[in-house]
Image: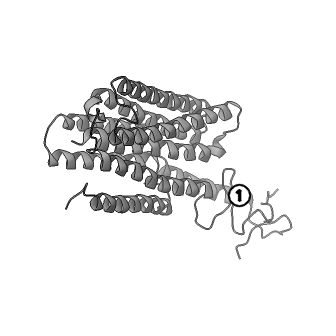
């Protein structure tokens, strides 16, 4: 059982300033790792805008299957960037990543099977 | 004089440190509210997956009437998409602001997010009314029906998100969102970013892919 200082504790009780200092250091470490700066977010926003512009450009290039595959890759990339940076999945608990990816994976598998069944997708 | 921590009580899990902005310790190590939102978003993947798949199934099944592909304007929808992406940027800047304790900036960025979201919805309404005027309603054919249901559901999600954002602005004005409660903004932000990434998928699958 973890010792927690109580009001009734004697001279061996841990003082508040020491614990506060430890907590502050821990919080600062978490802060540094957990939160990108505003500048980072702006750069990510710019990257997303550029990717969107490229996608729209690709629309006008009638490249058939290659265009489709490239557009899908760009879509996945934008999805991952927003999820990773804006939704903080990159910096948060792996449990949250697992929960979300499980939902996506289940949806992708299920609906790929549906589309295959109805002949929309072919292998 | 030593300042000692309070004794653990029924509301204080053993071993938990008291921090001004901490939550009660959870078995998973993450807040229950955030985990619940991620679980909800995972389930929303199934909803939108179903709607997108339905559109893909019906895309070439129209026997009469115009289809979305005959009518939409890629340049207009690209601008809409850009606006929604930038609203995601504004949302994350709002979160960063409140995590720094800057309540004024929080309100500015939340309002900006809601405004950009409203611009997106206005664009959707314009697009829908333009399609209806040119003869494509929800009942015209199966393709148009699937299109309107998919983009309509997305639009409703965006609208609910805007209402949520404006509620947060109101709460912040009343001083109910201090730095210690920044997770409220984070959770609302998760919903908003999800709505944005759903549009990323819709824009590519419905509008861009030949």
Residue shown at 40% from the left, 58% from the top: A107
Q: Is residue B189 visible?
A: yes
Q: Nearer the viewer, residue B113 or B203?
A: B203
Q: Chain of mark 1?
A: B
Q: Secondary structure at mark 1?
A: loop
| Farthest-out residue, right | A8
- Relative height, residue B204 to residue B104 (above, below): below
Residue shown at 30% from the left, 57% from the top: A115
Q: Nearer the viewer, residue B152 or B168?
A: B152
From the image, tell me which residue sits under label 1: B18
- Residue B81 image offset from top left, x and y in percent: 36, 34
Which of the 4 image quarters holds residue B130? top left
Quarter of the image where the N terminus of chain B is located: bottom right
- Residue A66 image offset from top left, x and y in percent: 15, 48
Which of the 4 image quarters holds residue B16? bottom right
Quarter of the image where the C terminus of chain B is located: top left
In this picture, residue B61 sits left or right of residue B48? left
| Farthest-out residue, bottom | A1
- Residue B107 image offset from top left, x and y in percent: 59, 30
Q: How is the image coloured?
A: one colour
- Residue A2 image offset from top left, x and y in percent: 70, 73
């Amino acid at each position: 059982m973890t010792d927690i200082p109580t009001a009734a504790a004697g001279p061996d009780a841990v003082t508040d300033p020491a614990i506060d200092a430890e907590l502050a250091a821990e919080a600062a470490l978490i802060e540094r790792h957990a939160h990108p700066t505003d500048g980072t977010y702006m750069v990510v926003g710019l990257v997303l805008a550029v990717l969107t512009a490229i996608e729209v450009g690709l629309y006008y290039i009638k490249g058939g299957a290659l265009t489709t595959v490239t557009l899908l890759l760009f879509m996945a990339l934008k999805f991952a960037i927003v999820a990773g940076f804006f939704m903080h999945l990159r910096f948060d608990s792996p449990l949250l990543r697992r929960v979300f990816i499980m939902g996506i994976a289940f949806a992708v598998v299920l609906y790929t099977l549906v589309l295959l069944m109805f002949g929309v997708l072919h292998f | 004089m030593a300042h000692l921590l309070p004794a653990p009580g029924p509301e204080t899990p053993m071993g938990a440190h008291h921090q001004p902005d901490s939550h009660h310790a959870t078995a998973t190590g993450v807040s229950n509210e955030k985990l619940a939102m991620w679980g909800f978003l995972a389930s929303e993947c199934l909803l939108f997956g179903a709607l997108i798949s339905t559109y893909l199934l019906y895309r070439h099944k129209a026997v009469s009437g115009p289809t979305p592909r005959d009518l939409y304007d890629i340049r207009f929808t690209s601008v809409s998409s850009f606006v929604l992406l930038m609203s995601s940027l504004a949302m994350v800047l709002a979160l960063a602001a409140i995590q720094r304790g800057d309540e004024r900036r929080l309100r500015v960025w939340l309002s900006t997010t809601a405004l950009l979201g409203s611009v997106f919805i206005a664009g959707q309404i314009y697009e829908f009314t333009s399609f209806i005027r040119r003869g494509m309603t929800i009942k015209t054919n199966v393709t148009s029906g699937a299109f309107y249901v998919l983009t309509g559901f997305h639009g409703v999600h965006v609208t609910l998100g805007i209402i949520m954002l404006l509620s947060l602005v109101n709460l912040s004005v009343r001083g109910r969102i201090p730095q210690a409660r920044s997770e409220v903004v984070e959770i609302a932000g998760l919903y908003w970013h999800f709505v944005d990434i759903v549009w990323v998928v819709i824009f590519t699958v419905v509008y861009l892919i030949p």
